Amino acid sequence: MLAKVISCSVVGLEGTAVEVEVDIYANSLPSITLVGLPDAAVKESTERVRAALFNSALYYPRGRVTVNLAPADLRKVGPVYDLPIAVGLLAASEQTPLDRLEQALFIGELSLDGSLRHIDGVLPMAHMAQQQGIKTVYLPEVDAPEAALIRGIEVIPVPSISALVSHLRDFDPIPVFEHRESLDEVEDAPYSVDFADIKGQEHIKRALEVAAAGGHNCLMTGSPGAGKTLMARSLPSILPRLTLEEALDITRIYSVTGQLPPGTPLVNQRPFRAPHHTISNAGLVGGGRLPRPGEISLAHRGVLFLDELPEFGPHNLETLRQPLEDKVVTISRAQGSLSFPANFMLVGAMNPCPCGWYGDTQHECSCSPAVVSRYQKRLSGPLLDRIDIHVEAPRVDFDKLSDARRGESSREIRSRVELARERQRRRFASYAEGHSELLTNADMGPGEIREFCAVDEAGHSLLRAAMRQLHMSARAYHRTLKLARTIADLIGAERIETAHLAEAIQYRPRWQV
């Protein structure tokens, strides 16, 4: 007898329907054959299914069993097919009705006792079910809150294979999972660092506020102990709250990579990723034999912090250039290409020289001019050109460190950032159709810059002088205009004034290549 069960595979960040066909030929020696390009984890599912059915007091059919995972040219990875194979065996052996398998998606890993375990990639699988018009999704009980983020489908939380059989036979129906997570129901967790606790460095706080308001990249340079890492780690506390669309985008990435925290079906804070400088290229930008998202995709809609930036491998740093420009990374293999989102804020920190004391007023630098120059040139001109804000972090003196007064809190700064982001959202919403991907000023292209970043004659004169003296490229010119637009948004100005341009130009590096 033949039974067909719908399951799902995750390719990149998208779900793809997989049809599990189970055929039983009773008049033959007992055997089971699994075809359809399965990997080792999928092949092992036959033994897990056998033990789960026996330990759940269910009948394991005798005879020759053939299981086909279609389409046959799509590689099947992971234990997600345990449940659909088990259901197919039960249906083909007439232990469950075939009509209950129509318009239903089955995903889940089986334990040997018949219970269901957590699986990765539930959110894109549930999204695929919604797109395909599949009405019901059967999945492990622990994964039901994540699947319920997708509207328009019934989510059935399955505790075990025996409970599923009782449900399909209408002996003991499993209630539909009703609680659906919402961003409005989840309060922000407290941040470990507040801007009010940072002493001094007011100009860097201002630069980070501008960066947060417009989604701009930032590089901090200064001697050891100046507070660069502390200020970078405080940046998420002033970023605006996630919209539901942004939260679902981030959750999908973390779901596929298996990095969703337990009991947290929806990511409700912007990511902050801080990889070590020994990270591989595949770990940073993504890759592998079966490409998976890297740190730049895990930082999507959040912050990628690279401490000791010159210590990262030159190849790793240069591979950041294209994602910084296009907000997406494409990984090509012989089997095909996959694209992962990578719209992140890059925040870097570095010392001015190998010993760290070049330019310091109290420590003498032990590096020769050639060594200092060689160290700073580890960051190429094209990479520096893609960083909007360059600031120096000087030593903090004793009077500021010992001052008991608290500075402006992250909550106050965040309110200004959110107002600036709201102005940008309204501006882009009123723009021509087809530009819904624009969320911040940093996302603007040449057309949007021409539309929203007009300057007066005094501004033109200032930009002309800046381009001549700082040797700014065309990219730096456009990034300066976008930065000035953000500075104007922070105070609610309709037009870019000369003062906004002057501040934006001050954030450009003094060593343009």
Image: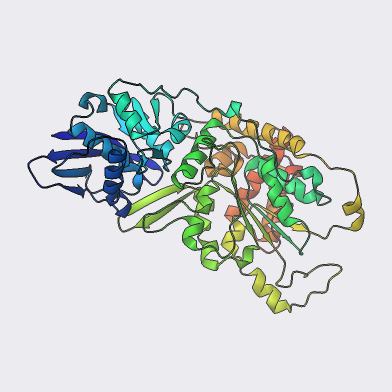
Q: Nearer the viewer, residue 390 or 21?
A: 21
Q: Position of residue 315 (x, y in %)?
A: 51, 66
Which quarter of the rendering shows the N terminus? top left
Q: Residue at x 40, y 55 (%)?
A: 331
Closer to us: 485 or 470: 485
Count numbered badges in the picture: 0
From this view, report whether residue 433 is shown above or below residue 471.
above
| Colour scheme employed for the rendering of this structure | rainbow
Q: Is residue 267 left or right of residue 209?
A: left
Q: Nearer the viewer, residue 173 or 490?
A: 173
Task: Give the residue furthest to the left.
Answer: 27
Asked if one can make out residue 219 in the rendered structure from this viewpoint, the answer is yes
Of residues 355 and 479, the one nearer the viewer is 355
Percent position of residue 259, x then y:
51, 46
- Tell me where residue 447 appears, x and y as whole percent: 53, 41
* Screen quadrant of the C terminus: bottom right
In-image side of 30 versus 52 (left or right): left
Q: Is residue 350 above or below residue 107?
A: below
Q: Residue at x 13, y 43 (%)?
A: 63
Residue at 56% across, 42% down:
301
In the picture, measured across the screen, residue 253 lies left or right of residue 234, that is left
- Can residue 17 be seen here? The reply is no
Q: Position of residue 318 (x, y in %)?
A: 53, 62
Tell me which corner region of the image, top left, top right, bottom left or bottom right, holds residue 53.
Answer: top left
Q: Quadrant location of residue 107?
A: top left
